Amino acid sequence: MKIIAALLLLTLPASGQVIDVHMHSYTHEEYWGQGKSHGGVSSPKTVDQHLKETIEEMNKNKIAFAVLSGSIESLQKYTDADSRFIPAYLDRETLIPPAEFESYIKSGTIKVFGEISAQYYGRTLTDSIYAPYLRLCERYGIPVFYHTGTAAPMSPYHGYPKFRISLGDPLLIEDILVKYPKLKIYLGHAGIGFYEHTIDMLVMYTHLYVDLGVILWADPYLNECAIRFLQFAKKAKVLDRIMFGSDQMVWPGAISKSIEFLNGLSFLTDEERRMILYGNAETFFKLK
């Protein structure tokens, strides 16, 4: 039963130069910014301001399309405000029932499954809880967006007691790629410190993609991971499956900062930057 793939087909404006495959949305209750600063950028104090500034950043950077990860309620708010947002269902420790998930796929309310946050809850994508959702995603051609790498310092003490860095190793989902050969998967944050394992996965599984996410802007250590990963990816000839994602979270300014960092990497050619910023995502999501 192959439907819904058409839901991902968009007509991109001629001026579009960037596709961001990693953004986040919030409801008023979920929003945790309230003016916090990180990585040289400040968060808006309210969710309405966050939405406004995110759209302003999209306009400034000519973003034609953005995968927006959040709760069903927050996705509705943001997608109503701007048609460039593509809604992606962010899971929590408990998930909506599979039948409801399928109905949201059919209605176009969910067009991507993720960012899947398994690591925060002490599990990986191989956990049986995800099996019915992965089957539905494979059936309907819904891309799967999976968190890899690490998280904010002291995460096990700040709301996520089951979080473990070791669960962020991309190698741990290899069985999923073998079990679901038609499933479209991309790995968030390129594995961060596990970037060599990410390269191994990309070389072996030629249908696997990754996004860069937080490693482009959050701090110098993550920036170094981005540099090493991209240099290694270039040598491994897998740059054609790496996509731009800002992971702006509560900091819309991270979008500009991420693009500036990527554009400043002299070892990438202009064509390679264009692939990462636009072309690879256009191919992965089958955009027109």
Image (spheres, rainbow, N blue to C red):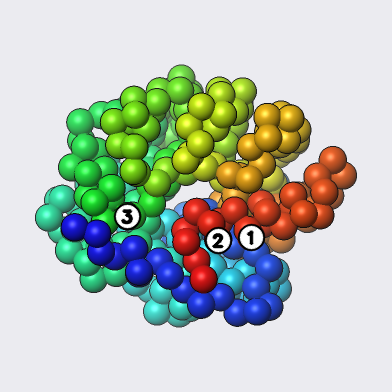
* Residue at far top of view: 166
Crowd band around label 1 with a 10 angstrom C-alpha radius: few (<14), some (14–19), many (20+): many
Residue shown at 40%/26% (left/top)? 174
Residue 257 visible within the image: no
Location of residue 259 (image quadrant): bottom right
Q: Amino acid at mark 1?
A: Tyr
Residue hosting label 1: 278
Residue hosting label 2: 282
Residue shown at 59%/71% (left/top)? 64
Residue shown at 62%/69% (left/top)? 63
Earlier sequence position, callout 3 versus callout 2? 3
Q: Position of residue 283 (x, y in %)?
A: 53, 57
Q: CA distance from mark 1 to mark 2?
A: 6 Å
Crowd band around label 3 with a 10 angstrom C-alpha radius: few (<14), some (14–19), many (20+): many
Crowd band around label 2 with a 10 angstrom C-alpha radius: few (<14), some (14–19), many (20+): many
Q: Amino acid at mark 2?
A: Glu
